[in-house]
Image (tube, rainbow, N blue to C red):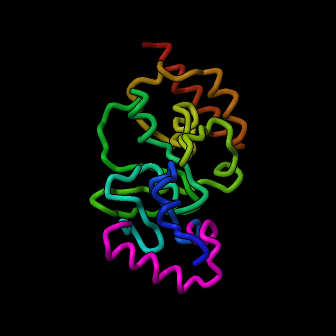
Amino acid sequence: MKKNILIDILRSPSTVFTFKEILIASGESNPAQLKRRLHYYVQKKQLHPIRRGIYAKDKNYNRFEFATKIYTPSYISFETVLAQAGVVFQYNKTIFAASYKNTEITCDNQTYSFKKLKDEILTNTAGIKNRGNYFFASPERAFLDIVYLNKEYHFDNISLLDREKIQSLLPLYHNKRMIKSVQQYFDALNME
């Protein structure tokens, strides 16, 4: 190994690392050698294995960061974002992320639900914030992600959303049904 990768991992602001990231950062030309070294660190409890090929500094890793490392590209969205923004009130321990596939995974007593979006939507960064080690949808983008996948969904408080931002993000979905649905949600809000 060209350098002590454990020191670099521990100094990094990231809390979660994929094998591929560690391989590139280490400069190691022999992946099998790196796997043995990482296994040694895990045995000595200097690294926490979360899932095959994904490691954390310790058990207190950032769950959002981990979610976006399972499948790349991905970003935190849907109910996770809207619950934090106060748009939906139901507490759901599951972490929801937009991804290129539909699946649900449980690791370390945490459930992660990945919802599939078309590539041109998933890779468009409009309304997505970089939080340093992971990407997080704005409430308006998360709202539109849900409307895109659900014909009918109950939102508790859409008055917290910025209509202008929603209107500016709407064209990236290329979906006429969504335009109608968004209008219906805001018409219903105006009638209250």
Residue 158 location in percent, x, y? 47, 24
Image-quadrant location for residue 154: top left
| Magenta residue check for 32 | yes
Residue, far front: 3
What residue sits 51% from the left and 55% below the top?
Answer: 68
Residue, far left: 109
Is 27 on the left or on the right of 8, as rendered? right
Count of labels shown?
A: 0
> Where is 40 relative to 6, above or below?
below
Q: Main secondary structure of the magenta part?
A: helix
In the rendered image, the quadrant that contains the N terminus is: bottom right
Q: Nearer the viewer, residue 74 or 156?
A: 74
Image-quadrant location for residue 40: bottom left
| Magenta residue check for 16 | no
Q: Nearer the viewer, residue 56 or 65?
A: 56
What residue sits 53% from the left and 38% below the top?
Answer: 142
Residue 13 location in percent, x, y? 50, 48
What residue sits 67% from the left and 27% below the top?
Answer: 167
In the rendered image, the quadrant that contains the C terminus is: top left
Q: Nearer the viewer, residue 41 or 175?
A: 41
> Where is 28 relative to 99, above or below?
below
Q: Nearer the viewer, residue 62 or 128?
A: 62
> Where is 115 relative to 34, above or below?
above
Q: Which residues are magenta?
A: 22-46
Residue 119 location in percent, x, y? 68, 56
Residue 56 location in percent, x, y? 41, 61
What residue sits 47% from the left and 42% below the top?
Answer: 78
> Where is 5 relative to 122, above or below?
below
